[in-house]
Structure formats: structure tokens, C-alpha cells
Image (cartoon, rainbow, N blue to C red):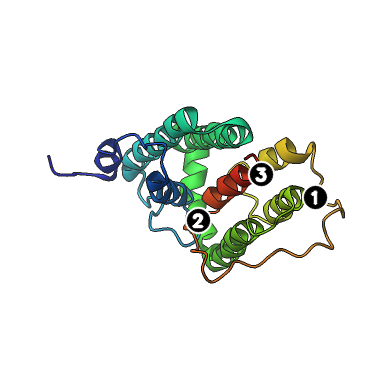
């Protein structure tokens, strides 16, 4: 059966296996769920296109949740569970017809004007997460996560919740980490499409 819509595309996907071969697919899904910035998936301009967008988003969130429940452990599982919960909550606000939905549809074209700034911010965040994987000290890795997420766009998925999970009630004006420099991503390290995949890989590196 040919794919008729974005929703059909996600429905045709099989559950992700707990192997490295699934990571690129997971990275693509995370990138598609971030619709501000350099995303190949745009928020619909017409309200009649919103149901297809919402159905596809919920299917992608479901795929991530299934992968998380089968494949992740410990802190990584907690972090991804927070992301799934937040994503579902956000989609509920977007997809439920009413005043909030009308306001979002009206305001979104204005939000896209900051795409270039968001792109730069997200690229720095991704490179910081990847670069931190080169550290040998696990405590420094955690500090790098805190630094990177504290400078993420305010709308980045579960930013504050992840910070709170890693270090208690995080306060943005804390100066504990201000003097630390973020390690650079090596040329041999491929830049991912989303920041969330290198975050989970970084968490894995100090749980093993």
C-alpha cells in the first residue's frame, strides 16, 4: 500500500530494535519532533492539516516510548520517560481544538522568525553533548550536561525536568559551572540531527 500521508509513514514503521542500527532512526524521530529551527518537518500553516501532523507526532512519540521501555535502563530510561511525557503533554495542548490551539496557529509564523538563532543554539548544544563524551571523568560529564542544557532554547524538550533530575532543583543563576569549558566535538565524531541522542549516549557512557 503506498504511503498517503505523514501519518501513514510513521504507522508503517516497525518497532525499533535494541541495537545500534536503530540509533539513526531514533535520532531522526527526535529531530522531527523539534519543529522550530532547521527541521525538515514543518508545523502546518492550515488548521485542516493539523490532525495529520498530530497523528504522526503521536505515532513517533509512541515509537520512542516503546524503545525506551524495552531498551533503556536506569537514568537513561528516566530521562527519556520525562521526554515522552512532556512531548505528549505538548501535543495534547497543540492538538486539542480550542482557544490555545487558535493562539498557537496564529503565533507560530512569528516564532519561525527566530529559526536561524535556534539553529545556532541547537548546533552548539549537539556539539557540546558529543564533545563531553570525550571526557574521562564522569562528574565532569554531568557538569557538561548541566551547562549545555542550561543554555538550550527554553522550549527544548524537558530541559528543566532533566536538569532537576540530574542535580536537584537547578537554578539558572548558579555559578558552579560557569568557569568550565565545554569540550569540542572531534572531526571524527558525526554531528547528530538532534541533541537528545548524544545526551542519552552520554548518560550511557557513565552508567557502564
Q: Are marks 2 and 1 in contact (CB under 8 Å)?
A: no
Q: Is residue 76 above or below residue 127?
A: above
Disc 2/disc 3 C-alpha distance (Å): 31 Å
- Residue sitting at x 73%, y 39%: 166
Q: Which mark is residue 118?
A: none
Q: Residues within 10 Å of mark 2 (few under 14, many from 20)?
A: many
Q: Nearer the viewer, mark 3 or mark 1?
A: 3
Mark 2 / mark 3, whichever is N-terminal: 2
Q: CA distance from mark 2 to mark 1?
A: 23 Å
Residue 36 in the image, given as x and y percentages of width and height: 50, 56
Q: Few, some or many C-alpha atoms within 10 Å of disc 3 (few <14, some 14-19, many ≥20)?
A: some
Locate the N terminus and report the quarter of the image it occupies: top left
Distance (Cα) linking label 3 and label 1: 24 Å
Q: Residue at x 29, y 36 (%)?
A: 14
Which type of secondary structure does the marked residue at label 3 adopt?
Answer: loop
Q: Which residue is mark 2?
A: 36
Label whose residue precedes the other's in the sequence (3 or 1): 1
Please name the residue that numbered disc 1 is placed on: 172
- To which quarter of the image does residue 126 belong? bottom right
* Label 2–label 3 contact, CB within 8 A: no
x then y, percent, for residue 142: 73, 48
Amino acid at each position: 500500500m503506498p504511503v498517503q500521508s505523514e501519518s501513514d509513514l510513521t504507522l508503517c514503521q516497525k518497532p525499533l530494535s535494541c541495537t545500534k542500527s536503530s540509533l539513526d532512526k531514533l535520532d531522526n524521530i527526535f529531530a522531527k519532533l523539534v519543529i522550530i529551527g532547521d527541521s525538515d518537518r514543518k508545523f502546518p500553516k492550515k488548521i485542516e492539516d493539523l490532525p495529520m501532523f498530530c497523528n504522526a507526532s503521536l505515532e513517533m512519540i509512541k515509537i520512542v516510548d516503546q524503545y525506551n521501555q524495552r531498551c533503556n535502563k536506569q537514568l537513561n530510561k528516566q530521562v527519556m520517560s520525562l521526554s515522552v511525557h512532556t512531548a505528549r503533554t505538548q501535543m495534547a495542548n497543540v492538538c486539542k481544538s480550542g482557544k490555545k490551539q487558535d493562539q498557537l496557529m496564529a503565533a507560530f509564523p512569528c516564532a519561525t522568525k527566530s529559526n536561524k538563532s535556534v539553529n545556532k543554539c541547537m548546533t552548539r548544544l549537539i556539539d557540546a553533548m558529543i564533545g563531553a563524551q570525550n571526557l574521562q571523568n564522569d562528574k565532569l560529564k554531568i557538569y557538561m550536561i548541566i551547562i549545555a542544557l542550561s543554555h538550550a532554547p527554553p522550549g527544548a524538550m524537558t530541559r528543566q525536568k532533566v536538569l532537576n533530575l540530574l542535580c536537584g532543583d537547578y537554578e539558572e543563576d548558579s555559578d558552579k559551572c560557569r568557569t568550565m569549558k565545554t569540550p569540542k566535538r572531534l572531526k571524527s565524531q558525526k554531528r547528530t540531527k538532534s541533541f537528545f541522542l548524544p545526551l542519552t549516549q552520554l548518560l550511557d557512557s557513565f552508567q557502564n
